Image: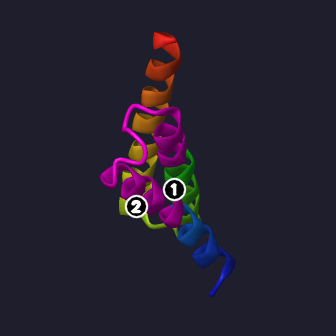
Amino acid sequence: MTTTDWVGFIGVTILLIAFFLNLNDTIKKESIIYLSLNFIGAGIACFASLLLHYLPFIILEGSWTLVSAYGLLHYFRKK
């Protein structure tokens, strides 16, 4: 596996962990942990997509990162 593969693997793993923990009601979608895992995982996966020059996933993961950032901002504004 290349470095780009490892970067993508780490990002996607973080996203899947967040998804799995939410499905099992371990963390809620409004929690700082869930929002942070999505932001970090999507950001890393977006970076890997940039390294691959694969536009569809750059758009997907970039959008996911932005939506997660919005969720984090909304979380901190409520506090």
Q: Is residue 32 magenta?
A: yes
Query: Seen from this angle, which residue lies furthest bottom?
Result: 1
**Who is closer to the viewer here, 63 or 22?**
22
Q: Residues within 10 Å of mark 1 (few under 14, many from 20)?
A: many
Q: Earlier in the sequence, mark 1 or mark 2?
A: 1
**Who is closer to the viewer here, 79 or 42?**
79
Q: Residues within 10 Å of mark 2 (few under 14, many from 20)?
A: some
- Location of residue 38 in the rendering, given as x and y in whole percent from the top left corner: 47, 47
Q: Is residue 63 magenta?
A: no
- Location of residue 76 in the rendering, given as x and y in whole percent from the top left corner: 53, 18
Magenta span of residues: 12-39
* Identity, as a three-letter code, of the amino acid under mark 1: Cys
Q: Which residue is mark 2?
A: 57
Q: Which label number is shown at residue 32?
A: none
- Location of residue 73 in the rendering, given as x and y in whole percent from the top left corner: 50, 22
Q: Residue at x 52, y 12 (%)?
A: 79
* On screen, residue 62 above or below 50: above
Query: SS at mark 1?
Result: helix
- Location of residue 17 in the rendering, given as x and y in whole percent from the top left corner: 47, 60
By secondary structure, the bulk of the magenta-drawn segment is best described as: helix
- The Cα atoms of the two marked residues, 1 and 2, are separated by 7 Å
Q: Residue at x 36, y 49 (%)?
A: 22
Query: SS at mark 2?
Result: helix
Quadrant of the rendered structure where residue 28 is? top left
* Identity, as a three-letter code, of the amino acid under mark 2: Phe
* On screen, residue 74 above or below 9: above
Indicate the quadrant containing the N terminus: top left, top right, bottom left or bottom right. Answer: bottom right
Query: Seen from this angle, which residue lies furthest left?
Result: 23
Label 1–label 2 contact, CB within 8 A: yes
Q: Which label number is shown at residue 46?
A: 1
Judged left or right of residue 60, residue 48 is right
